[in-house]
Image (cartoon, rainbow, N blue to C red):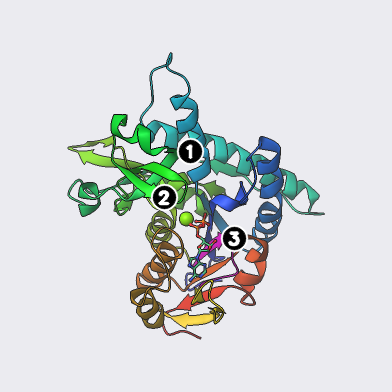
Amino acid sequence: MNRRGMRETLVIALGGNALIRKGQAGTIEEQFANLKGPMQQIARLSMDFRIIITHGNGPQVGNLLLQQESCCDVPKLPLEILVAQTQGQLGYMIESTLDTEFMKIKGAQSKQLVSLISYVVVDEADPAFQKPSKPVGPSYPEGAVDSLPWPVVKTANGYRRVVASPAPVTIVEKQEIRKLVAMDFIVICCGGGGIPVIREERGFHGVDAVIDKDLASARLASEVEADVLVIATDVEGAALSFGQPEQKFLRHISCVQAEQWLRQGHFPAGSMGPKVKAAVQFVREGGKRSIITSLDAICEAVSGTAGTEIRKHGG
Ligand code: ADP
Ligand code: MG
């Protein structure tokens, strides 16, 4: 129970690996099989907690971009539409897998699930629009770069298009999400960090950008006054000197410690950096705790026996 006398609300952010593991081709059978483990755990957690699920979409949007590139007969769609497509696709896959896992829990009442197409407001003046930094879609050989209509970045596997990754300002559907969660729905939302939109008087219009899903999840968690933010990925937590012989996974840390290690470069941009930033941001904005954990240990992380837990004053 939380201080409002309600069951605690968890926001669980699933990394891209929840669907496609490193080295896999990403067939639909693989994606459904990968979802099983995390959904089994979420089904169990939903007996004791209210749940909101968010998810990444990098590989799925990448595949849609690749499909567009290989077909010239159909008009190309902008990124905002591709993000909307993946919210529908992944929402369906998560819902149906979770539903199947509920059926397997003896005596459990099945929960009502809902996937929301979510927009997230970004600021037109965000400096990220001047410095596109997030690689998306396929890699191109050096020779193709000059004919591409967008900025690119050189990566280990060739050149990739880069887009702006502005900060999430607010989740447009936050009131709807709050109400659904209060009614005990499990809500799947903010997929791929949400569809980035800019306010235009009383309306919104989509922009060609992507929002980091961990930062969007932290924003959402604060806005719906969730109790715990769980960021589930393919490593057991955040480590100091990651990949070095002296690597050390962290268990209980404070916001101040996390920020210090961030500044020292232990958590790089584009992978562990945004997770630690999101975790700190949520706790600073009043969340009880954030946990970065492996997809296989979501339940243990929630019960305090796995993952890197970030609290205001450590533990
Ligand atoms: P997701 O798809 O879940 O968002 P990312 O690939 O963006 O996952 O981030 C997780 C990756 O971050 C891990 O697979 C790991 O290789 C990398 N990483 C970089 N630095 C660290 C660190 N300090 N501690 C743990 N993992 C790290
Ligand atoms: Mg990531």
Give the residue at mark 2: 155
Determine the image quadrant of residue 94.
Answer: top right
Identity, as a three-letter code, of the amino acid under mark 3: Asp
How packed mark 2 is, by other alpha carbons closer than 10 Å (few <14, some 14-19, many 20 or more), is few
Q: Is mark 1 within 8 Å of ligand 1?
A: no
Q: Nearer the viewer, residue 218 or 267?
A: 267
Q: Nearer the viewer, residue 44 or 48?
A: 44
In the rendered image, residue 35, in percent from the top left (x then y), is placed at 66, 48
N-terminal of the pair, mark 2 or mark 3, is: 2
Judge left or right: residue 119 versus residue 311.
Answer: left
Q: Residue 183: x and y, percent? A: 54, 51
How far apart marks 1 and 3 lie (CA) works out to 19 Å
Residue 229 visible in this rendered orientation of the protein:
yes
Say above or below: 290 vs 86.
below
User: Does the magenta portion include 230?
Assistant: yes
Tell me the tag on residue 62: 1
> Is the C-beta of the residue carrying label 3 under 8 Å from the nearest atom of ligand 1?
yes
Residue at mark 3: 234
Alpha carbon of mark 2 to alpha carbon of mark 3: how far? 21 Å
Q: Are marks 2 and 3 in contact (CB under 8 Å)?
A: no
Task: Check disc 3: other Cα within 10 Å, few if <14, some if 14-19, many if 20+.
Answer: some
Residue furthest to the right in view is: 106
Q: Amino acid at mark 2?
A: Thr
Cα gap from disc 1 to disc 2, whole angstroms = 15 Å
Query: Nearer the observer, disc 1 or disc 2?
Result: 2
Q: Secondary structure at mark 2?
A: strand
Question: Given the image, on which type of amino acid does mark 1 rest?
Answer: Gly
Instruction: Describe the element under mark 1 as helix, strand or loop.
Output: helix
Magenta region, residue range: 227-238
The spot of residue 238 in percent (x, y) is: 51, 72
